[in-house]
């Protein structure tokens, strides 16, 4: 049996800069049990100080390499940086295929940088909720910048990447990559678009396509810039960071507080949903739930009527 | 005000082969209101006859083009085919960027083929649930094969593509594509792997990488085959269809019924969750929910405590 850890002790040690305590604190909030609740309720009032930036885009677009440079640029301004790298859920990976994350280890000796990989399974309430909790902990513990990097371009990834102040969408200069970006629903969430691997052919066309597609949408107060870079060499990555900073300045002059208040309301909604999810899971596992599940599996009762009947005792 | 449509009338007409009625029926079940419920409860007992095949893989991998050929191969066996193509949610698209779907229109004159595009927004209860309902309607109305094609490789897409009998994962012979497939969590769900665009360089390496990664996992009774094809010309696509058929034969000799019973139980769980989601949405919109939401937005109350307090009146 593991020795119970007092969250308050961990929190105090983490605030003093102890990385081992910070790591354990984050492991605590990756779950959604009592321990996680205690930590989150304690740190919540201290959130809202960090600037949070999300990185999304197709697998292989070069997000990790770019993140590495953004850490460097943020550090150059004196800011401390927390990074949350959301890994895919796969029994095949075992960490072995995450070699490109190694690049971020450039900063492993820097006490002003903390990098955390998250596996995308095992969190009750979902990956987006768990990621959000980890970001809040890093924010509350005083990291000036928090970068969130996702793998893939699905709805969960979009949710994660857009639950931040500034969303950076990374694409490559491949024919059709801009169109695929649109297909993946990324055009709407990007505050900054980055064409990485800009030393390859097709960069002008990709920039042109992105510009055209951004201008196709409704005119917004913030017009997302399209920045090119070569993350492998670092060329242009300071422009990416400048674009993030420009977006920050823009928001701080206007919608920042309202956007953050909206995100906090979303968190509340998510927390409520999570309570109900737990309740539904209990119900399904109950004797009544099992009996109805058998009937549904036998095509004797449709799933929706079964759900109504089971929920009726609880929801009035 | 639209004229109310009797679901029973639509259903009867759709069963007689009326495509307009089928389209309206499907529009009905894309939503999750009373009308959707009535239709689904009516058709549920007739489901479980079609063979359902999901297609997933990165945007641009050539899923639509391959699906077009699979329709052709299925038709050659005399089977009728329903296709559900899940489109991205984007105000930018307006259908204009979905040009590759046009390819499927090859079959538009064939009365044995029905193709339906679904937008990925506007469905209460989520896209996976709505897709599942549409697949069940096509199944219940007698389509022998139902193909589901998703865009993107996120969790929602994986959920959709894997909520079928046979899951086909499409990759391209690009360096690292096999690894990206693993990263996206697709190795675990694939029953058949297809390396499309096999006339391009790198196909042998991609096949080798996929083989290696599939063999890295735990040994399973069904070892997913890796098939190469060039969907643009049709070369090798009959091998893809043969692999789907082989997987079907394998399942029909063994786990088919148990797998389907599990999927039906999942549908039940999803229906229960959907009820709770509706309830949570009502609660958030209530006066008490708004008051607590304000406190959360002001950092005066943490979202988890607020959710507990709000749910307390309902969950006992």
Image (spheres, coloured by chain):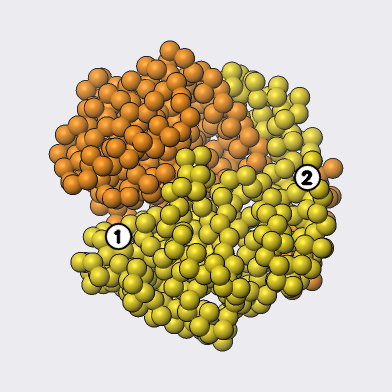
Chain colours: A yellow, B orange
The one of A206 and A315 positioned closer to us in this rendering: A206
* Vertical order, A248 against B34 (above or below): below
Crowd tier of the residue under label 2, counting other residues whose Cα lies within 10 Å: few below 14, some 14–19, many 20 or above: few
Left or right of residue A278, residue A163 in this image: left
Task: List the single residue furthest toward the front.
Answer: A109
Q: Which residue is drawn at 61% across and 73% down?
A: A111
Numbered marks: total: 2
Which residue lies at the image location 53% right of the left edge and 85% below the top edge? A77
> At which x and y percent is residue A59?
39, 55
Q: Residue tagged by mark 2? A: A2
Whether residue A79 is situated above or below residue B272 in the rendered picture: below
In this image, A1 relative to A269: left or right?
right
Residue B28 x/y as whole percent = 49, 40
Vertical order, B140 against A219 (above or below): above
Q: Residue B109 placed where, x, y %?
A: 21, 34
Q: How far apart are marks 1 and 2 (CA)?
A: 48 Å
Question: Residue B182 is drawn in which quadrant?
Answer: top left
Which tag, 1 or 2, sits closer to the chain's start?
2
Secondary element at tag 1: helix
Counting from the top left corner in percent of width and height, residue B180 is at 38, 49
B238 relative to B154 in the view: left or right: left
- Residue that label 1 marks: A177
- The subunit letter for the residue under badge 2 reads A
| Label 2: element kind | loop
Q: Residue shown at 46%/36% (left/top)?
A: B188
Residue located at (46% from left, 26% from top): B219
User: In the image, which is nearer the foreground, mark 1 or mark 2?
Assistant: 2
On screen, residue A58 versus residue B43, left or right, reads: left
Tag 1, which chain? Answer: A
**Placement of the C terminus of chain B among the 4 image quadrants:** top right
């Amino acid at each position: 049996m593991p020795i119970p850890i007092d969250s308050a002790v961990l929190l105090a040690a983490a605030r003093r800069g102890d990385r081992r305590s910070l790591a354990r604190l984050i492991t605590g909030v990756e779950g959604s049990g009592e321990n996680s609740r205690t930590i989150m309720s304690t740190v919540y009032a201290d959130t809202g100080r960090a600037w949070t930036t999300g990185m999304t885009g197709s697998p292989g677009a070069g997000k990790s390499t770019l993140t590495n440079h953004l850490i460097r640029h943020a550090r150059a301004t004196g800011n401390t940086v927390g990074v949350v790298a959301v890994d895919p859920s796969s029994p095949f990976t075992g960490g072995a295929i995450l070699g490109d994350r190694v690049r971020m280890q450039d900063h492993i000796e820097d006490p002003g940088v903390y990098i955390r990989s998250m596996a995308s399974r095992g969190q009750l309430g979902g990956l987006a909720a768990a990621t959000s909790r980890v970001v809040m902990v890093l924010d509350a513990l005083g990291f000036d910048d928090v970068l969130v990097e996702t793998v893939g371009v699905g709805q969960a990834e979009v949710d994660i990447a857009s639950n931040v102040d500034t969303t950076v969408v990374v694409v490559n200069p491949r024919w059709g990559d801009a169109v695929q970006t649109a297909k993946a629903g990324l055009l709407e969430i990007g505050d900054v678009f980055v064409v990485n691997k800009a030393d390859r052919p097709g960069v002008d066309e990709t920039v042109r396509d992105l510009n055209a597609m951004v201008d196709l949408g409704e005119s917004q107060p913030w017009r997302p810039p399209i920045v090119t870079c070569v993350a492998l060499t670092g060329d242009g990555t300071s422009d990416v960071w400048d674009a993030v900073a420009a977006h920050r300045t823009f928001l701080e002059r206007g919608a920042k507080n309202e956007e953050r208040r909206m995100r906090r309301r979303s968190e509340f909604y998510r927390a409520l949903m999570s309570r109900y999810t737990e309740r539904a899971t209990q119900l399904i596992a109950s004797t009544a739930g099992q009996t109805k599940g058998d009937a549904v599996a036998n095509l004797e009762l449709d799933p929706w009527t079964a759900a109504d009947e089971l929920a009726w005792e609880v929801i009035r």
